[in-house]
Image (cartoon, rainbow, N blue to C red):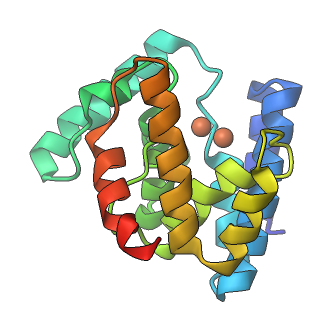
Amino acid sequence: MTKETNIYIDYIRAVLSDERYNHSLSVAEMCKRLSENYGSDPERAYLAGVLHDIRKESDIETQKAEVEAAARLASLTGEAPVGDEERHPKLLHAVAGAEFCKNQFGINDRELLSAIRFHTVGKADMTLLEKIVYVGDAVSNDRKYHDVKYYKDLAFENINKAVFEVVKFTILKTVKNSLKVSRYSFEAYNFYSEFK
Ligand SMILES: [Fe+2]
Ligand SMILES: [Fe+2]
């Protein structure tokens, strides 16, 4: 593990609860293993996992402010707009986390930032790192839901099919709870349905 990664681990240890900290390391480990499986940089995938929930337990008003800053910048630069659905309290931390890592840590790896930003809703045509973080978050070893083994095995066999199954599961759960579904999730669903 690099010195830089250790600094971020120390940071999340300080700001996250035990449960969220353990989840983050669990996701990082899963991202590393998936990355090794698919022949990409395991250290970078591990770091993305460490950072993905970095704002999850921070003050909600601060998260909102970070999301609005990211939304303003996106409208100026033509980057992916922040949808209203992503302003749900449970989802804010994804956009806020990427914004925080860019501004507070000076991280400028755009793909890594995007993997953090889309880890909750997914999107169409993701890069390998984005897919690894999206799926890694769903199948990390601390996850206990029914059928987790099926999703985990699939993640190592066929990452595109795993993205499809995870986004389908997430959309169904969101609909069941009568919440709005992000258009990015629908776009991911349609895109990855080609791989089912
Ligand atoms: Fe998250
Ligand atoms: Fe997570």
**Quarter placement of the N terminus:** bottom right
Q: How many numbered callouts? A: 0
Nearer-the-camera pick, 76 or 189: 189
Q: Which image quarter: residue 181?
A: top left
Q: Is residue 4 visible?
A: no
Residue 43 horizontal/vertical position (percent): 72, 72
Q: Is residue 40 above or below residue 24?
A: below
Nearer-the-camera pick, 31 or 99: 31
Nearer-the-camera pick, 112 or 89: 89
Q: Which image quarter: residue 152?
A: bottom right
Residue 35 horizontal/vertical position (percent): 68, 77
Q: Residue at x 84, y 39 (%)?
A: 144
Using residue 70 as the reference point, say whether residue 15 is left or right of it.
Answer: right
Q: Is residue 145 above or below residue 69?
A: below
Residue 105 horizontal/vertical position (percent): 55, 47
Q: Residue at x 46, y 28 (%)?
A: 174
Residue 14 horizontal/vertical position (percent): 81, 29
Using residue 77 as the reference point, say whether residue 173 is left or right of it.
Answer: right
